[in-house]
Image (tube, coloured by chain):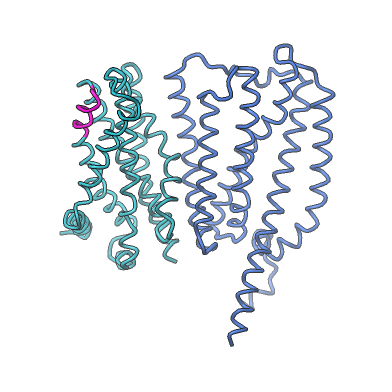
């Protein structure tokens, strides 16, 4: 077992044994989708038209809600310091954390999307496109979130600052994610979202590790 | 240290010394202020008295002389902050943090003014304060990024540590701004094919271009002047902080 897979196993074990936060996030995701019809009315054609946007907003909000558990607990109990002195470079540790966080927080959202699709009167085509968009786009959201979590790790008020920093930067993810609904421009949007996701996922471990080092100095 | 101290450091490291910076900018502030005032006087004279009305917009064209310089500065200030972020990450330049901290509120103010004057201009000419046009939307996102950076500065107690973290965020934002710009333009053409903007740039007659260029110079000088004064204030504030801390140590002994 290499150090990297041991790290991944640790993260997943922690996530599943410590209180089922993934289930709470899924609950939150579904709840955001449920309250929107109360705000705009139960008009089924309108819900169909708005449903991809609602799902994306719900995904954005639940990603932001889960940010705090990325580095903060490890920073507070000191395991981040230990991890910084392990055989793995900090960048690899951040990347492992990113993968684990995506598996624990984003994959459940993907699995819960059909529930929202049912409630929001989505068509089968819309559901397929939204699920694909979420599958491609959530790694970028998680990676942006890791950046936000890393730069605010030592802050007492960081929980509020991170979303404010991350939201404007993550706008392209939402634009291309919702753009995949378009029958004509959807293909281009898919490729752009894929490119964005790959670039952000590739760069964020380095930048987040830089921030964690600066915060730990 | 004593062996190298006799050698005259190069200009770059001399620039890095806050005391040196305070010394040579002391004689820069007033001349810069005078130059700013003169160029504003000339620019405003041109803008209000010595430039023609637009044949379509009438007097409303004069908003341009305030709007365009602010929009230019909203991007120029981010460029300065990006350079400062590189300076603090690569060279650990102590003044780069100060420059970033001084520039962020200025950038936010210029961006907000660009949006505000744009709204005032848009109401009579397009009939709406706000349009989800590509350029306006990305300016709005830029304002949000500025505000996020200011919020991050304020969230830190330790300003030295804050400098490096904010530099990283400034870097991320700077890399991201072209992506946001591209995605917003893409999104905009997807949703509204007929844009209100037409590409007008060099086709502008000289009678409108001269006041515009003078006003852009005036606003740029104003930005540099305010940035310098804010940097000086920040250095002095940090010095006062450390002095009071040292005084507190002395008092307890």
The answer to whether B214 is drawn above or below residue A144 in the figure is above
**Magenta residue span:** A113-122
Spot occupied by residue B183 in the image (x, y as percentages of width and height): 44, 29
Residue at image position (38%, 56%) is: A209
Q: Is residue B134 above or below residue A206?
A: above
Give residue A63's quadrant in the image: top left
Q: Position of residue B52 (x, y in %)?
A: 80, 18
| Residue A55 drawn at (x, y percent) | 29, 32
Q: Is residue A37 magenta?
A: no
Q: Looking at the rendering, which quadrant does residue A173 occupy?
A: top left
Q: Look at the image and say whether residue A116 sits in the magenta stretch.
A: yes
Work out whether residue B193 or residue A156 is closer to the camera in this orientation and state it: A156
**What is the chief secondary structure element of the magenta stretch?**
helix
**Chain B in the picture: what colour?**
blue
Measuring from the top left, give residue A52's x and y in whole percent. 30, 27
In the visual, does B144 lie left or right of A98? right
Task: Name the quarter where the C terminus of chain B is drawn.
Answer: bottom right
Count of marks, rendered view:
0
Image position of B115 with respect to B53: above or below: below
Q: Which quadrant is home to the N terminus of chain B? A: bottom right
Indicate the quadrant where residue B66 lies. Answer: top right
In the picture, one chain is cyan; tell me its letter. Answer: A
For image coordinates 22% across by 56% down, the residue present is A11
Going by the picture, which residue comes out furthest to the top?
B55
At x 31% / y 62%, what residue is drawn? A74
């Amino acid at each position: 077992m290499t150090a990297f897979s041991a790290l991944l196993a640790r993260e997943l074990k922690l996530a599943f044994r410590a209180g089922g936060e993934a289930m709470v996030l899924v609950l939150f995701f579904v709840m955001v989708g449920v309250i929107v019809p109360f705000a705009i009315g139960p008009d089924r054609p309108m819900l169909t038209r708005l449903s991809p946007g609602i799902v994306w907003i719900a995904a954005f909000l639940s990603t932001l809600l889960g940010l705090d558990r990325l580095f903060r607990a490890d920073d507070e109990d000191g395991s981040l310091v230990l991890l910084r002195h392990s055989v793995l470079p900090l960048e690899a540790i951040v990347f492992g954390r990113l993968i684990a966080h995506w598996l624990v927080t984003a994959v459940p959202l993907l699995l819960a999307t059909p529930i929202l699709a049912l409630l929001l009167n989505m068509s089968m085509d819309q559901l397929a496109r939204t699920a694909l968009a979420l599958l491609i786009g959530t790694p970028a959201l998680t990676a942006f979130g890791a950046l936000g979590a890393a730069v605010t790790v030592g802050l007492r008020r960081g929980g509020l600052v991170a979303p404010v920093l991350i939201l404007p930067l993550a706008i392209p993810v939402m634009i291309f994610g919702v753009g995949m609904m378009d029958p004509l421009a959807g293909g281009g949007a898919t490729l752009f979202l894929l490119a964005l996701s790959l670039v952000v996922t590739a760069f964020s471990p380095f930048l987040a590790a830089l921030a964690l080092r600066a915060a730990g100095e | 240290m004593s062996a190298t101290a006799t050698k005259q450091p190069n200009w770059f490291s001399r620039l890095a010394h806050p005391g040196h910076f305070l010394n040579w900018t002391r004689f820069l502030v007033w001349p810069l202020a005078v130059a700013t005032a003169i160029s504003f006087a000339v620019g405003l004279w041109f803008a209000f008295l010595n430039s023609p009305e637009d044949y379509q917009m009438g007097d409303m064209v004069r908003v341009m002389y305030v709007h365009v310089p602010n929009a230019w500065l909203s991007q120029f200030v981010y460029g300065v902050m990006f350079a400062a972020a590189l300076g603090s990450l690569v060279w650990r330049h102590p003044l780069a943090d100060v420059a970033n901290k001084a520039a962020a509120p200025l950038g936010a103010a210029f961006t907000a003014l660009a949006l505000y004057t744009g709204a005032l201009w848009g109401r009579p000419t397009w009939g709406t304060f706000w349009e989800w046009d590509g350029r306006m939307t990305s300016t709005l996102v830029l304002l949000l990024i500025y505000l996020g950076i200011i919020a991050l500065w304020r969230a830190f107690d330790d300003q030295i540590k804050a400098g490096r973290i904010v530099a990283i965020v400034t870097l991320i934002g700077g890399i991201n701004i072209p992506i946001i710009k591209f995605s917003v333009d893409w999104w905009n053409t997807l949703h509204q094919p007929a844009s209100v903007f037409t590409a007008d740039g060099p086709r502008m007659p000289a009678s409108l271009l001269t006041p515009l260029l003078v006003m852009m110079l005036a606003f740029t000088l104003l930005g540099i002047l305010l940035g310098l004064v804010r940097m000086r204030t920040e250095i002095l504030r940090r010095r006062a902080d450390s002095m009071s801390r040292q005084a507190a140590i002395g008092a307890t002994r």
